[in-house]
Amino acid sequence: MIRLDELIHRLQHSIREQQAPAPQEAVGGGVTCRICGDTGIVCSGDVAWICDCQRHNGKLRQQAGIAPELRDYSFEGFRIDYYDGQHRERALAALQAAREFTRDRIQGKSCQGIMFTGDVGAGKTFLAAAVANELLNQGIQAQFLVVPDFLDDLRTALLHNTGDSREPDDVALFRSVRQGEVLILDDLGAHNYTEWTCNKLYSLLNYRLNYQLPVIITTNLKMSELDEYLGERTTSRIVQMCRIYRLTVDKDIRHIKNQMRFRQEE
C-alpha cells in the first residue's frame, strides 16, 4: 500500500504538471478554499486527492491566454532596484496600484481599471501579468490578450465563418472577451488600426464600461497618440475606466537582465 506522504507527493507533482499551482494566500490575508485550506490537497484518513479548487484554477489558467514566459511573474518578483530617482517613484506607485486592484477584486469589490503607459521595457507587461497570475491563483477569471494577436484572431474568425446556423466564431470570441471578469489588454500600441479594428475596440471597451467590468491596459503610446490611433471616443472610454500610471526607465529592463545573465555565464 502506498504511504500517505508518498501519495501526497504524487498529487502535488500532478498539480505542478497541470500548471495549476496551489492558491497562495490572498492579497490582504485569508484562505480562499475552506475545503483544502489552500494546500491543493484533501486528506481523509489514509486517502488523499486533489481538491476541486485546483481543477477549477487549472481550467481558468488554460483559458487565460497567458504565455508560458509570463506565468511566473509576480508582485514579489517586480524589481524596484531596476529604477532610480523619479523612475522608482513611478514604479512604486504603479506596483501599489496593481496590488490594490488585485486585493479589491479578490475581496469582491468594484474597482476602477488601470492603464500602464510608458517606455518600452519599463515593466508594464510584468505588472499586468502579475495581476493576472495572482487573480488566477485565487480562482478569479482573468483573460490576458495581446491586442495585435487578438485582433488578428478576430479577423481570421470572421473570414472563416461558415454561414451556418451556429453562432459565428468571431461573435463567440468577441462575446467571451467582453464579458470576462477581468480583461487585460497588453500592447495597445501604434499598430495599423483600420476603421473595423477601431470600432471593435470601442465596442469592447464601451460594453465593459457600461457593465462595470474592469480592464488593465498596457501601452507605449501617450494620450495624444491614443487619440490619433484609436479615436477620441475610445480614448474617452479608457480615461473613464482606468487610473493611469506611467512607468519610465533610463534603459530597457530586458536589456539589463540580458547583460546580467551574460556576465554570469562568462
Image (cartoon, grey):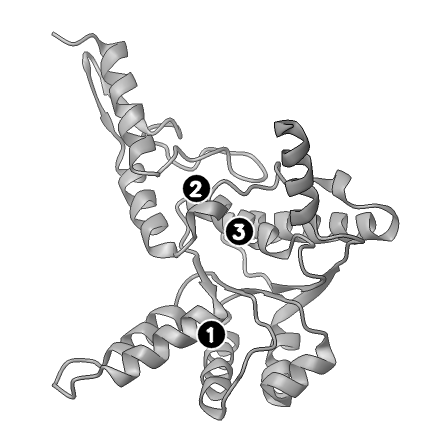
Which image quarter is the N terminus in? top left
In terms of secondary structure, where does tag 1 sit? Answer: loop
Q: Is residue 210 above or below residue 102?
A: below
Q: Nearer the viewer, mark 3 or mark 1?
A: 3
Q: Mark 1 or mark 2, which is nearer the start of the sequence?
A: 2
- Asked if labels 2 and 3 touch by Cβ distance under 8 angstroms, the answer is no
In terms of secondary structure, where does tag 3 sit? Answer: helix
Q: Which residue is mark 1?
A: 211
Which amino acid, mark 2? Asn
Q: CA distance from mark 3 to mark 1?
A: 23 Å
Q: Which residue is mark 2?
A: 137
Q: Is residue 106 above or below residue 215?
A: above
Q: CA distance from mark 2 to mark 1?
A: 25 Å
Q: Residues within 10 Å of mark 3 (few under 14, many from 20)?
A: many
Q: Residues within 10 Å of mark 1 (few under 14, many from 20)?
A: few
Q: Which residue is mark 3?
A: 129
Image coords of residue 52 (percent x, y): 26, 37
Q: Nearer the viewer, mark 3 or mark 2?
A: 3
